[in-house]
Image (tube, helix red, strand yellow):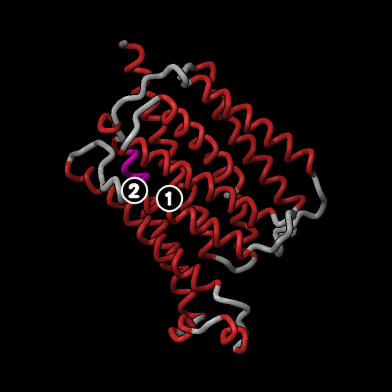
Amino acid sequence: MSKKYRYIALIPILLLVARIGDVALNMELSSGFYKSSNTEYHLAQLAVVIIAAVMLSHILKNYTPPKSDDIWLGGTGFVLFAASGFALGYANIRKLCEIIRMHPFHHFFMNREQLMQIGFSGGQFKFEFLCAVVGIAAAAWFVSVSLPHFKGQTGLNGSRLFALVPVLWYCLRAVSMFVAAPINSRDSVAVSIMVSCIIMANLWYSIARYSAFSENKKQLQRISVCAFLSLVFTVAICIPNIVPLMSRAKAADAIMLAADALTAACGVYIADSIIKRSKEKTDVQ
């Protein structure tokens, strides 16, 4: 990518600073709600993100993408994947233990009416249990990608069909957030995490599709834009949510956000590797 466009990478950093100020000054940490509405401010941020994403897509429209087997990750990439896998695994195992501790085994066989009789409003914990199990499988995929590095391999390896597991996990998690979150647009924590999960699902679906089926310019643009958006929403917007989550004693969810940041970094690293190889291939042609 041309050096004059590198300032696009500064946008997530600026949004992170703005988000930290937003959380510190205009959010009730115990609820995640805003103290006062600031719609114009958030619309302006969204406009900047959209403009930057369109510019990034336009920059890459003439790049010739390499074959997926030519993507070189190197030591840094494999360390990122290994760290992401272990962080995701730890967060989901901790979440799974919390669910099991709160809900004995026989609760999983009760219907909604029976659960309401013993003080539970529904079976949301069953869906969260499923999400945690799939999350552990997604963590296993990230670790499996890092393992070939110890055998001297440097490419993006691992089962391509298994690569859809992170996509499934982020989709299930987005649905879980939507069902569990209060129906209130001021709940910044719930809404931002849900949007982040949707973007991450798109990012890893794009990467899985690129490596398995299509190595074309549109797919390169989609990966790059999704990687940029993951930096904006998963890192810049969601990382400050760790503070309100910790204040609510939701340590597993807070750790999961940190793991999300690592997986977003993995996606950005892959996108950057594809762009570099694409530029080399385009320059040669």
* Circle 1 Cα neighbour tier, 10 Å, few/some/many (<14 / 14–19 / ≥20): many
Q: Position of residue 30 (x, y in %)?
A: 70, 64
Q: Residue furthest left?
A: 151
Q: Mark 1 belongs to which amino acid?
A: Val
Q: Residue at x 61, y 59 (%)?
A: 178
Q: Position of residue 121 (x, y in %)?
A: 63, 78
Q: Position of residue 118 (x, y in %)?
A: 60, 88
* Residue 285 in which image quadrant: top left
Q: What residue did someone put label 1 on?
A: 167
Q: Residue at x 55, y 62 (%)?
A: 176
Q: Is 111 situated left or right of 143 in this image?
A: right
* Circle 2 Cα neighbour tier, 10 Å, few/some/many (<14 / 14–19 / ≥20): many
Report the disc number at residue 88: none
- Label 1 SS: helix
Q: Mark 2 belongs to which amino acid?
A: Ala
The part of the chain drawn in magenta is: 76-81
Q: Is residue 46 magenta?
A: no
Nearer to the camera, 23 or 97: 97
Task: In the rendered view, tell whether residue 129 sits above or below residue 190.
Answer: below
> Tag count in the figure?
2
- Label 2 SS: helix
Marks 1 and 2 in Cβ contact (< 8 Å): yes
Q: Quadrant of the N terminus?
A: top left
Q: What residue did someone put label 2 on?
A: 163
| Majority secondary structure of magenta residues | helix
Nearer to the camera, 134 or 5: 134
* Residue 94 in which image quadrant: bottom left
